[in-house]
Image: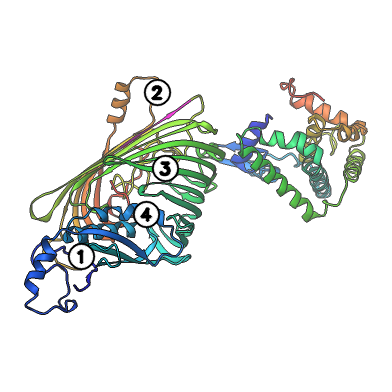
Amino acid sequence: MSLAAEAFVSQIAGKVPFIHVGNQVVSELGPIVQFTKAKGHSLSDGLDDVQRAEMKAYMELVNNMLLTAELYIQWCDDTTASEITRQRYSSPYSWPLNHILAYQKQWEVRRKMNAIGWAGKGLEQVYEDVSQCCQALSQRLGTQPFFFNKQPTELDALVFGHLFTILTTRLTTDELSERIKSCSNLLSFCRRIEQTYFEEDKDKGRL
Amino acid sequence: MGTVHARSLDPLPMQGPELGVQADDMDLGEPEHEPQQEVLENKDVVVQHVHIDGLGRTKEDILTYEIADVFQAKNLIDVMKKSHDARQRLLRLGIFRQVEVVIDTSEGEDALPNGLDVTFEVKELRRLTGSYNTMVGNNEGSMVLGLKLPNIFGRAEKLTFQFSYGTKETSYGLSFFKPQAGHFERNFSVNIYKVTGQFPWSSLRETDRGISTEFSFPIWKTNHTVKWEGVWRELSCLARTASFAVREESGHSLKSSLSHAMVIDTRNSAILPKKGALLKVNQELAGYTGGDASFLKEDFEIQVNRRLFWDSVLSASLWGGMLLPIGDKPTSIADRFYLGGPTSVRGFSMYSIGPQSEGDYLGGEAYWAGGIHLYTPLPFRPGRGGFGDLFRTHFFLNAGNLCNLNYGEGPRAHLSRLAECIRWSYGAGIVLRLGNIARLELNYCIPMGVQSGDRICDGVQFGAGIRFL
């Protein structure tokens, strides 16, 4: 998604992703899933209770690990923050608003990192955590096409979203995407989903 | 000769021995009274010295302009008149709590036989004053805490800090004001502020943080103000049910604009004037000094008042405005005009006329509104001479229109657009005047020409504010 549009949509709904149905705007994965469930569609209908609990656990792992690592690398690492993230974040605005908003967001994210105890972690430690998370996901996926057998579930959507973004976003080093690529089944999983569901967007940054 | 105290000269006596002189101050005997009177009245005098006593931090150079006229006086009555004027001018600087004038004969070696010395005894305001007020704006009330530092550097500069907590808005602001020495009406001020407003008619919340500088100067009978303003505006939705059109407007934007306003005001009062007229023209150009809002905005306000038979007043007013976007970007909801409510076209809900989307009013790029009012004293005049004088009954006819123009068409098409679908209303009510600042109205309104999408408030409508159509 282009950055100006991302800034724009995050202001409308507060958070990406969001859907606009009729008069309602629903944002974030949890509420969207609930919304579609209320309309009668659910991806995880075929799962039993044990599997559903497992799915929730893995989704929590992705949220706590991958999401936080992404935020850390973008905002708490000084080189990435100054060269890439702040420029991107402030691009839709004119001077001096761009500087004010970028520094405000950076301060907010760093405060959040302090609160959850990630401020003391170095970059290497964060890369290690990401690797461990990928190992866990890779083990769960094994040789199956999706995380829970033949059908895609919310977990697949969430994992795809994060991994695809990491693999296609340019950062100062390629360390993060290398770590993910080292788990080959995750890489082929992402490719498969991209080809099955998103093949019209051929120019949107291939893996 | 005794000392003449010229304290407060209302009304100014113009003939005879009653020259504002207190009889007990004169310790002359009766027989000498007659010839001394002649001396006081007709004798040419020369003002030799003018002193100002009681200055602390005020610098004298700004005061010399205000008192310069006193030296021109040629006889005693003139001296008293000119010193009274000088006293008013010193008071309007806003740096003295009290000014008293003492006129005496000159003494000393270079004293002429007909020389006079005029002394202004002044008491300066304290360095720091605090205040607590309640304020009534357009349909909202607020509590205002203020700190004022008058005359900080000695030349009538003023620094004010205000914090206002209201029913709809919370804001704070810091302002520095400096007049030009000798020409108090030419002044400049710098303001830094943060203002939050809630607009339920558009389901919008706006937070403005800005800085502005303005210069005011009079040219002949008009008063001009030139201002540069830089504002960081943050718009967000007030409710989950806000329409998508309003959601699209939310976000951050920066407006940097130059504006010019001209005011000619000959009314005798700003609230419930009895005579005189007002013309206010305002233009604003945004985008050429930075920022991302880019437009040219014009608006004007005309009001004419005339006294009729039996203490009643006929008042007619006309407002209008146009917003022209420059470049490709559409205009922002925060810059557009709004119409309707107890302070503009009565009979309609607050700002609830014109383009809307799912109940949220988006404002328009062009509008006009007019009103004709007849103000009369209350029937049977209860409380005459006292409280009853603050009330007026009023009969009104209001009309207006708000729409978006298609700028590709010519002015004729624009006028026809503004002339179709006119909303109007008529009714009667009671107006209460609050000091010289605000007024309250309670009206019975009948709205007409209502278009689909407008929200009306027919029947009884209450309004409070400073600026009414």
Residue A36, position as x, y percentages in the image: 66, 41
Mark 2 / mark 4, whichever is N-terminal: 4
The residue marked by circle 4 belongs to what chain? B
* Labels 3 and 1: the sequence-earlier one: 1
Among numbered discs 3 and 4, the one appearing first in the sequence: 4
| C-alpha distance separating marks 2 and 4 | 34 Å
Q: Looking at the picture, which amino acid does disc 1 mark?
A: Leu
Instruction: Decide whether the magenta segment is chiefly helix, strand or loop.
Output: strand
Mark 2 lies on a secondary structure that is loop
Q: Residue furthest front?
A: B109
Spatial CA span between label 3 and label 1: 35 Å
Chain hosting mark 3: B
Q: What's the mark number on residue B256? A: none
Q: Amino acid at mark 2?
A: Tyr
Of the numbered discs in the image, which one, if any, rests on residue B215? 3
Q: Nearer the viewer, residue B381 or B97?
A: B97
The amino acid sitting under disc 3 is Phe
* Left or right: where B18 falls relative to A1: left
Neighbours of disc 3 within 10 Å: few (<14), some (14-19), many (20+): some
